[in-house]
Image: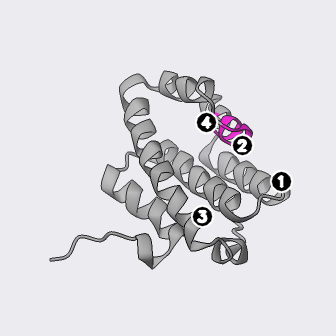
């Protein structure tokens, strides 16, 4: 069960949201790394400077916890850590990424769409027919 404080997301400034666009690209690269190297891809990310929340989230997955447990723990951590602004949105995006990769194969475009949706309509790039 996800509890997302949408007020914190809405209070994230446009400039803060813009800074998260490259982060979403970084996560799609991490998805490729995970597909190529499996769990080792996550280990490399952790070693290369992941923040404490990212480390804990990936360790839950790497240790084989069920998706439901990972989801609860990640969102409990997000909401009990007093993240604010950009940091809060970044943590929510990372949790969404980790859960999407853990639960089922997801395409890059679907992943970008899912993660970008937290930034608002200004950042959502939908293909037009």
At a point 71% along the width and 78% down the height, the residue shown is 7
Give the labeled residue for mark 4. Answer: 61
Figure quadrant of the N terminus: bottom right
Residue range corresponding to the magenta coloring: 51-58
Q: Nearer the viewer, residue 75 or 113?
A: 113
**Disc 4 residue crowd, few under 14, some 14–19, many 20+, Cα 10 Å:** many
Mark before the other along the chain sequence, 1 or 4: 4
Eyeballing the image, is 92 above or below 50? below
The label shown at residue 16 is: 3
**Disc 3 residue crowd, few under 14, some 14–19, many 20+, Cα 10 Å:** some
Query: Where does the image place residue 97, in percent across and percent down from the top left?
Result: 52, 50
- Mark 2 in CB contact with mark 1 (< 8 angstroms): yes
At a point 40% along the width and 39% down the height, the residue shown is 29
Give the labeled residue for mark 2. Answer: 53
> Is label 4 in a helix, a strand or a loop?
helix
C-alpha gap between disc 2 and disc 1: 9 Å
Mark before the other along the chain sequence, 3 or 2: 3
Give the labeled residue for mark 1. Answer: 81
Mark before the other along the chain sequence, 2 or 1: 2
Viewed as shown, does residue 64 lie left or right of 28? right
């Amino acid at each position: 069960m996800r509890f997302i404080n949408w007020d914190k997301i809405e209070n994230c400034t446009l400039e803060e949201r813009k800074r998260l666009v490259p982060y979403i690209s970084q996560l799609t690269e991490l998805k490729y790394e995970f597909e190529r190297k499996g769990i080792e891809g996550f280990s490399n990310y952790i070693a290369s400077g992941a923040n404490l929340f990212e480390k804990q989230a990936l360790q839950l997955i790497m240790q084989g916890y069920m998706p439901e447990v990972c989801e609860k723990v990640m969102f409990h951590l997000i909401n009990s850590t007093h993240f604010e602004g950009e940091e809060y949105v970044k943590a929510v995006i990372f949790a969404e990424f980790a859960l999407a990769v853990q639960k089922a194969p997801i395409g890059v475009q679907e992943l970008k769409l899912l993660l970008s949706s937290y930034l608002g309509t200004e950042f959502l790039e939908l293909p037009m027919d």
